[in-house]
Image: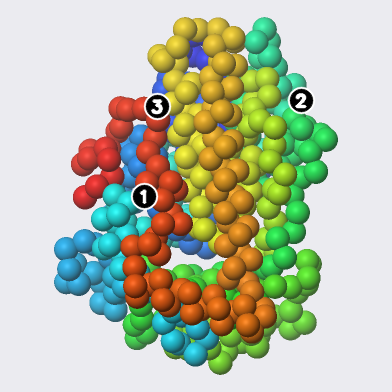
Amino acid sequence: MARSSRAVVIGGGIGGLTAAATLHRGGWDVTVLERAPSLEPVGAAISLAPNSLRALDVIGLGDEIRDLAAWQSGGATARPSGVESEGGLRTPSGRWLARTDADVVAERFGGPLVMLHRSTLIGGLAGRLPPDAVRTGVAATVADPGDTARPARVRTADGDLEADLVVAADGIRSAVRRTLFPDHPGTVYSGFTTWRVVIPVPGVEFASHETWGPGRIWGSHPLKDGRIYAYAAALTPAGERAPDDEKAELLRRYGDWHDPIPAILAATRPEDVLRHDVHHIAEPLPAYHRGRVALVGDAAHAMPPTLGQGGNQAIEDAVVLGLRLALGSAPAGGTHLCDGLAAYSADRLPRTTAIARQAVRVGRLNMMTGRAGIAVRNAALTTLSKAAPLLFLRGFEGIADWRPPEPPYAAGKNPAGKR
């Protein structure tokens, strides 16, 4: 396989663009096909943990994203006004169940947790690609996955494209996943819906928090640009929508919860609110590849957002795939490419399956509805947070401390992601 080998990426979201950037850096000629008319993402903010930031170091983007953290190590004077390093879990009345300090988290896992708007991340990823690499307004699917002896074929309205490699990053409703694994049952409804907003709320200062109520949660987080990212989730039947508008629905469900939630809702317009039912893949796929096609992100392992790891795992997928298939890392030929894809599946399937299952368990915990169970849960959280605060972080061990499988990294400051 020559260095002009062609990779076609289906989907221009976070996973697809990360894969394209990593493959481009590894010597591939990359084309990204995005069905939307632009790369402007449909969504709000995203939380990037130290594991995905270390993955982004591989393409030289990690430090740029770390600099967008709403807090920086070194004391409160380094933070924007109103941004505290300490946050945690609260009840609807405002009582703290558990406190966590962002400085402690960064020390434990080797870097900060960064909240940023998805469009900022998309822009940074697209900037790692040649100007003509991304084609928007192009719907695509796989006509032939290929094998060791023949290339894959991608079908578009303008004709078929041959590719030595296809990366399917076409999301939770992935058509490519259905083509590769037609007998797989697909996604299931997670039992709850989500709302998200990113808005300015002048004069409001607060500690980053998530609040757990009966069958409902709310999260409020300051962004470095001065806006606030807020999200909510609640147990609802699939497909249910507000009879009036989604801001009114949020007011009904959360309007009497603690500050700053009423102020955030007051500043929210109905058109600011995004609502989506949550689906996940309950039965893992048998592999994340077939022939010359690899699945990344939600197409491979859609999970509930309860651990904040969906986008993070898509970034990990993309970087591991690119490293496994860097053109200079193995002899040329379809056999070696397919071997690299098999190694990618072996790397990623166990890890993402375990994280997805953990996300489902956490969803059951924070969406509890019974009074007795909630009382026991809240008491346990409070005791654990006070008696052994570091134990409270153990759920992220093996997740946030992950590192890419091999150097070199492109980050200019330091490869390990420690500042």
Displayed quadrant of residue 411: top left
| Residue 139 visible at all | no
Q: CA distance from mark 2 to mark 3?
A: 27 Å
Disc assigned to residue 25:
3
Residue 397, position in %: x, y?
Answer: 41, 51
Disc assigned to residue 61:
none
Identify which residue is drawn at 74% across, 49% down. 187
Return the residue nearer the eye: 203 or 362.
362
Residue 289, position in %: x, y?
Answer: 64, 27
**Mark 2 belongs to which amino acid?**
Ala
Mark 1 or mark 3: which comes first in sequence?
3
Mark 2 or mark 1: which comes first in sequence?
1
Q: CA distance from mark 2 to mark 1?
A: 37 Å
Identify which residue is drawn at 43% across, 77% down. 382
Identify which residue is drawn at 36% across, 50% down. 50
Return the residue nearer the eye: 33 or 43.
43
**Mark 1 belongs to which amino acid?**
Pro
| Residue 83 visible at all | yes
Identify which residue is drawn at 40% across, 64% down. 392
The residue that mark 1 highlights is 50
Q: In the structure shown, which secondary structural element does the residue marked by tag 2 occupy?
A: strand
The residue that mark 2 highlights is 143
**Mark 3 belongs to which amino acid?**
Arg
Crowd tier of the residue under label 1, counting other residues whose Cα lies within 10 Å: few below 14, some 14–19, many 20 or above: many
